[in-house]
Amino acid sequence: MSSRPQRPSSPGPEIRATPGAFPSTPAEDNSPTISSHYSLSQAVHARRAEFTKSRTIRVKVGTWNVAALSDTEKDVGGWFIGGKGVSDKLSGLRVTDEDDPKKDEHGNTLDLKDIESVAHQEARRTKKVSSLPRHDPGSLPGGDDIDIYVLGLQEIVDINSPTEALRPFVDPHPAKKWKRAVIEALPDGYCRIADQQLIGLLLLVYASPAIAPTITSVSSTSVGTGLMGYMGNKGAVTTRIVLGETTRLVFINCHLAAGTDKNMVDRRNWDAQQILNRTKFEPVYDGSGVLEEFGPGIGDEDFAFWFGDLNYRLDSLPADDVRRLLMLHTRNEYDSGVLSSKKIESELSKLPNATISGSNHRSSEDSGFSSNTAFTSSSEQSSVTLPVDPHSDPASLQTTLSSLLPHDQLHMQMRARKAFHDGWREGPINFLPTYKYDVGSVGMFDSSEKRRGPSWCDRILYRTRKDVLDYERKVREEDKAKKRDEELQARGVAKAIADDEDVLFDYDPETDGAENDYDENLDADPGVVVTKLGYEDRLHLDYYTSHQRVLSSDHKPLDAVFTLTYDAVDTDLKAQIHQEVARELDKAENEGRPGVTIVVDHHSPDHDGSTNDDPTSASFEGVNFGHVRYDQPKTRGITIANTGRVPATFGFVDRPSGEHQNGASPPWLSIEFDRPSNNQNSNANALQEYTLPPGDALTVDLTLRITSISQVRLLNDSSQPHLEDVLVLRVTNGRDHFIPIRATWLPSSFGRSIDKLIRIPEGGVRKLQHQRPHGSSGGSSTPVKWSAPREVFRLTEAIEELVERAAAEWGMRGEGGDEKPPWEEGLGWPFVEGGWRWEPGKEREGLKMRVREALDTDQAFDTTWTPDVPALWRLEVLAETLLEFLTSLEDGVVPEHLWAGLEAAIIEREKTKSTLSADEERAVILDSLASSPPHSVAFTFLTFMLARVANEVAPLASEPRKSHPKATGRARARTRSHDPARLRRRQVEQSLAALFAGVVVRAPMVGGRERERRASEGRRMRVVEVFLVGKGVG
Amino acid sequence: MSARASTGSRPGGQGRFAQFKLVLLGESAVGKSSLVLRFVKDQFDDYRESTIGAAFLTQTIALDDHTTVKFEIWDTAGQERYKSLAPMYYRNANCAVVVYDITQASSLDKAKAWVKELQRQANENIIIALAGNKLDLVTEHPDKRVVSTVDAEAYAREAGLLFFETSAKTAENVRELFTAIARKLPLEQAGARNLRSNPRPGVDLRPEAPGTQGAGACNC
Ligand SMILES: Nc1nc2c(ncn2[C@@H]2O[C@H](COP(=O)(O)OP(=O)(O)OP(=O)(O)O)[C@@H](O)[C@H]2O)c(=O)[nH]1
Ligand SMILES: [Mg+2]
């Protein structure tokens, strides 16, 4: 069963919701801060040459199928760590350096001649101790010459036993036994880096004290390919490590399907492919500090080592012949008389004259096997013919091996591109097949009934990143060549059909004929390997041999020593450079921020010259609007200049201030840029942004205008006559600039209550000097100055006068003119549009403002106009102002409480059904209002004025004065109702009454039925109307 | 995997990287901008203009050889009239430095008010440091000190704040202040962020490698 690689325990690469942007904009778009970690790591990576140091280490990879035999672990220290048990003659590997004699632990020179003889070794073998020969100084590098030990074991438990295969948990004891044996043999300080077990498969990785701390990203995993394709009786255990932060190594210990059957080769190939496909490791942080997207597998590393019992056999050769042929060599190891020796001799005596031929395409000084070259070699040879007479040249072990190797299934599969063809290589096989021996013997091949054919089941393959890339390139080129061939063929045919004109094909010998490129791969040294992270590493195979004199298993152990030169990160240096880079990046980031300068234009003086009479204004850094009045727009300019080195994007952002106001500016301030925004088409609520190149500037007009009466009331009532706010200009990726706004409020008579207005001193509301005029309700009462608001009196008086004048002037023009008088164009004239001779607009607004100013400062209206302003215009402006003034009143001329009493009285009357004369009606109303004299007086002013206006604009032909002598009462009544003048008069009365009732009477919202609402509305209108009807001219 | 993995200097890996938002608050002229200038550029100005706005700067510090913390610093305006804008800057801050001037009693009151506001309105897990600045002024003239170290420290402890007396002028305790904040930030809780798929800033943590991957496990 395969144990899956564990997922990283940390949250991994999924996106975390950021806890909100912090003033959101600076970080939101492509700012330098975004990629900061990425760029930091990249910048550090770019300087890797400064913090990496070349390091050379030795890696020993060993593999051994221990056939579930007990006490095999007693040998592991000797052969794997000690390098012992190599039979010099049978390995064909001249590993013993005569000039550098080995010493034993006591410093005594050890002579190879002192090594225990094979006969003696076999004879004394007991299970209690190591089966290795005594006095073996060890022929391979071991101990602390090796920095990383990688041991792959197979069959540490009986994989054929169903109990083992189906065990629901792993029995830790066998693995423990092995770990103990290895660690005891290792020099002090060596650490286990990884261990992974899958039933019988065990992979152990150890590192020296110097190297262990530089190993990271260790990830181990298993893939089962056994029963049903998934069980762990066959498969692989694999470990990935990263060395010195730069170099990825993968170790694969496998046990592939056994069996000599032809179809078992395919099964072994399938197993290998499964291992390749299904092995997945935990992600590694790559050179830029970014976690890999998803678990890497085999092929993503820089160096891979694949070893174990691959179980490939010698194909098509009679097992017995091979056994005997090989025993010709092993018998030389024995002194005669030993048991095995006798057995061997007896077998050899049966040797027929058959010979085994090998192909000669490989030299005997084989430099190894590379899958990249293998598939270009000649076709397999399966014939069994002679060239070597084993009797004549038994000493040449190499010749024998060379004759057998072409039949090695693994090499054949590699050549056929069926397995291990994608870049895998193997060192030269100069040793006897490692399988299958009688347990306890050095050289007796399986003498049991089965007489298994000797095979190189156990192998150590390796592959560099370069090998993989070379293979992939080779395949690509072959594909290309194949396509070209097909094309050529197609064209050739086409050409034959067409005329016989010569067709020249582009044939480039440099790129075509890819086979040539592969000769270099014959070298056992893969050369410089550019790693995944861009470092240049080297891997060299130093030794590849079996340990013939290990007797405890039916397989001989096998190991290979590699020298690896790689660039390792020096962590101290890296930390230093990391810090340097961070500092530089911060500096670049902070200095590269956009910057703007804001200049407030102070040069726009007020029309009224009252600009900066505020003593604090000189020191004020913001935009000072000076004095501002009700509904008086004032504009100030600011200039924003890009004084940075990069384009600057900015805009006014929402301020969090206040309960009622959000947004980029308060409601009384509008912001207008001199150009459209970058995102002018987007939603109006979106932040409007503007971009300026360095050195460029733009202007922004800020216009202050207070139109809201509630705002006016707030300001009038405030003891602080200032309007203050702050605009926030945010430069994307830069700083925020605060632009304080200030204005000084000039109190207005608008928006007040009648009770307050009658207390305004002579000289107007401005004379109050920002003291609040207290109403009678508020504590210390300011003395009452007027019987009614002076503003009402002044406005009504002026309007009456002007209406009269206007009518008189019109009359003087003679009635013959075509032009209709303005009052005939609109029934609400002159209070509302319709007949106005002066179009609403800026000038009219300006004049209105001056009228209000005259009211507030108690100046005569005459000072307001220039002589050229026609009387009609003056009238219109005053009339409009009056209406606005009445509307702005806090309580109204007939406040709610007065109206309540009044309406009750009217309803009472209505119930009696008695019809009242107009005079009686008026008396009721005035009676009711009399409870509040100022309101009553104001009401009288207004109604009186309205009556005058009605008389002027719709006179009743002075009827009462010159009554027709013939007219009877009835006739008069009839004429009346049909008289157009009368009709018009009624209309004027009604519209003026409706208009003024709406602003004069403050009635609560009446809920309930429509009829009641209408009735109440009618009553309100009647209250005004009754003062306009039947009153005559005067 | 055994103990060695956790004994500090674990080599290899690319290290953790975290980005945090830091806001400076405090009365005008206590030296907020000066502290930032010292921390970011290692400079000091005797005459600095009062900040009208909020300055934005970044600074990266390495806590050890595998942890990097990047601060996004917002240096706010201390003047009273801009007080209402402060929430824009502390609202999403991960940490705050509240500064007072050890020679101005009123500035500590103001600092306490800020702490209160932060504890009420800012992120629940905000890390607050209290910095009593202008330490250099009292080294020569001890009588200039009006806020005693003991009192301020007691207050900081009670309110759960980091506490340092600093001098932007001499650089004393400035780096220590920011480093202490970085150490207290929740590096572990925050998860890894893959920048390739998430180009948004924020708390960004990149553990070197999941715990199970560390080497250095040793059985000997
Ligand atoms: N002696 C001394 N002076 C300092 C120190 N820190 C700041 N100052 C001075 O104090 C003054 C105000 O410093 P700033 O950094 O501008 O103060 P701030 O807190 O940013 O003020 P605002 O921007 O108005 O909120 C400057 O003149 C600095 O030179 C310090 O540690 N020692
Ligand atoms: Mg400042």
Image: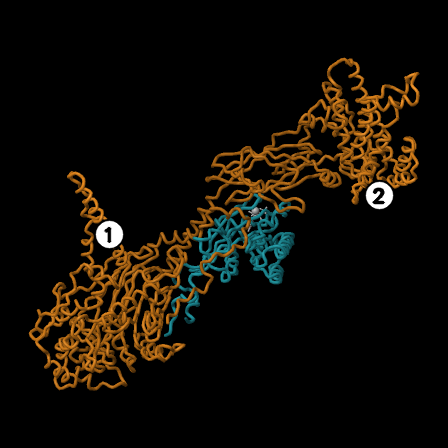
Q: Residues within 10 Å of mark 1 (few under 14, many from 20)?
A: some
The colour of chain B is cyan
Q: Which chain is orange?
A: A
Q: Quadrant of residue A220?
A: bottom left
Q: Is residue A824 above or below residue A100?
A: above
- Nearest to the observer: residue A52 or residue A926: A926
Name which of mark 2 and mark 1 comes first in the sequence.
1
Q: Quadrant of the C terminus of chain B?
A: bottom left
Mark 2: amino acid: Ser
Q: Residue A764 occupies which quadrant of the picture?
A: top right
Residue carrying label 1: A477
Element at label 1 = helix
Q: Amino acid at mark 1?
A: Glu
Which mark, by number, is residue A777? 2
CA distance separating discs 2 and 1: 102 Å
- Left or right of A986, for residue A12: left
Task: Work out whether residue B172 can be spotted.
Answer: no
Q: Position of residue A630 (x, y in %)?
A: 71, 34
